[in-house]
Image (cartoon, rainbow, N blue to C red):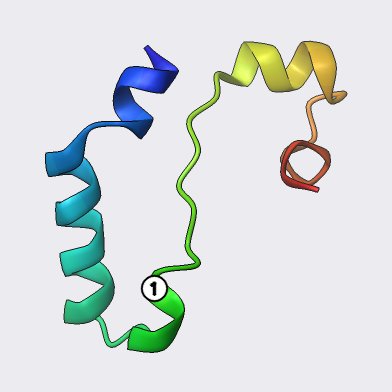
């Protein structure tokens, strides 16, 4: 399911539209990555810490 969400073209397009709408720097948008993970995985593998997950 995570890969399906990550590869969803419509979801990605809508996300990019929101970045533009809310004036995120246009030259930085291409470097934004959106990840999907369950709280269960973060709890188990990263001591419940989202910072460690993204680090």
User: In the image, 47: left or right of 8?
Assistant: right
Residue located 50% across and 67% down the image: 31
Which image quadrant for residue 52? top right
Total number of numbered labels? 1
Give coordinates of residue 14: x percent, y percent. Answer: 15, 54
* Residue closer to the observer: 31 or 25: 31
Q: Is residue 35 above or below residue 16?
A: above
* Residue closer to the observer: 52 or 6: 6
Give coordinates of residue 10: x percent, y percent. Answer: 12, 42
Find the residue positioned furthest to the right: 47
Residue located 50% across and 38% down the image: 35
Residue 52 makes an appearance in the image: yes
Question: What SS does tag 1 mark?
Answer: helix
User: In the image, 37: left or right of 46?
Assistant: left
User: In the image, 38: left or right of 54?
Assistant: left
- Name the residue that disc number 1 marks: 29
Give coordinates of residue 1: x percent, y percent. Answer: 37, 11
Residue 25 makes an appearance in the image: no
Residue located 72% across and 22% down the image: 42
Give coordinates of residue 23: x percent, y percent. Answer: 28, 88
Q: Is residue 22 above or below residue 32?
A: below
Which image quadrant for residue 8? top left
Mark 1 crowd level (few <14, some 14–19, many ≥20, 10 Å Cα) = some
Residue located 16% across and 67% down the image: 17
* Residue closer to the observer: 28 or 40: 28
């Amino acid at each position: 399911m995570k890969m399906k969400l990550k590869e969803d073209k419509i979801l990605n397009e809508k996300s990019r539209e929101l970045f533009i709408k809310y004036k995120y720097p246009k030259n930085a948008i291409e470097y934004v990555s959106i990840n999907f993970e369950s709280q269960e995985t973060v709890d188990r593998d990263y001591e419940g810490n989202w910072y460690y997950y993204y680090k």
